[in-house]
Amino acid sequence: MGKEMEEISAEHKNFIEAQHLFFVTTAPLNEEGHINLSPKGFDCFRVLSPTRVGYLDIVGSGNETSAHLLENGRITFMFCAFDGPPKILRLYGKGKTVLPGDDEWDKLSQHFKILPATRQIIVADIFKVKSSCGFGIPYYEYLGERDHAIKWAEKKGEDGLEEYKKEKNMVSMDGLPTPIASKFI
């Protein structure tokens, strides 16, 4: 059953790397604010050390994770086994956003395949790792990645993506600023 640890083990890392999908959760400090839960694909998650992870984040219709991290840093990742033995793994940490042009970008971006829709890298220092059984998780068959985001980004082009970020990614749905806002001010 469930276990708690302070670091990501080699077994955890192998499990994470085998998953095609993970979930990210953040929330603002305001109790009236919206909790954000986002599914992620594209083989974009990396275990950087036993206590540090990162994922490549693509442009989307909002930027809640980045806004919440700027405000309070709290982040949780969840991985579920949809095939093989049942398992759920959660990583609890303090995160931040790294934008293209930031001091850490060049070093961090080497861990990822940069996609046309790349917006930022989310990095988190992990302080708790928790596993649970996953007995209630159904089986699903992985058929491949969707190409919609990549085609959309290629059609928009670099200038179009920058305009889209100005329109949709500068503040959260609760009005919190994102790190992207500082690029355009």
Image (spheres, helix red, strand yellow):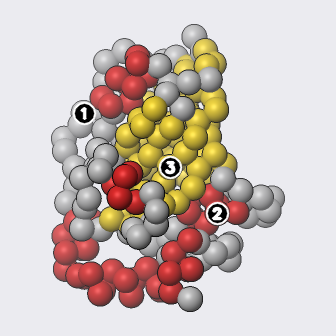
Residue at the image point whose x is 50% and y is 81% from the top: 183
* The N terminus - image quarter: top right
**Amino acid type shown at disc 1:** Glu
Q: Nearer the viewer, mark 1 or mark 2?
A: 2
> Is mark 2 in CB contact (under 8 Å) with mark 3?
no
Label 3 Cα neighbours within 10 Å, binned few <14 / some 14-19 / many ≥20: many
**Amino acid type shown at disc 2:** Leu
Residue 141 marker = 1
Q: Position of residue 11 (x, y in %)?
A: 40, 17
Q: Which badge, 1 or 2, comes first in the chain's sequence?
A: 2
Q: Which residue is mark 3?
A: 123
Residue 41 seen by the camera: no
**Amino acid type shown at disc 3:** Val
Estimate the spatial distance between the alpha carbons at disc 1 and disc 2, rounded to whole Å: 36 Å
Residue 70 marker = 2
**Which secondary structure, mark 3?**
strand
Label 1 Cα neighbours within 10 Å, binned few <14 / some 14-19 / many ≥20: few
Q: Quadrant of residue 142?
A: top left
**Which secondary structure, mark 1?**
loop
Residue at the image point whose x is 58% and y is 72% from the top: 178
Residue at the image point whose x is 24% and y is 68% from the top: 116
Estimate the spatial distance between the alpha carbons at disc 3 and disc 1, rounded to whole Å: 29 Å
In the displayed structure image, the side of residue 133 where residue 34 appears, left or right? right
Residue at the image point whose x is 44% and y is 46% from the top: 54
**Which secondary structure, mark 2?**
helix
Q: Is residue 77 above or below residue 58?
A: above
> Is mark 3 in CB contact (under 8 Å) with mark 1?
no
Q: Is residue 36 above or below residue 7?
A: below
Q: Position of residue 105 (x, y in %)?
A: 40, 60
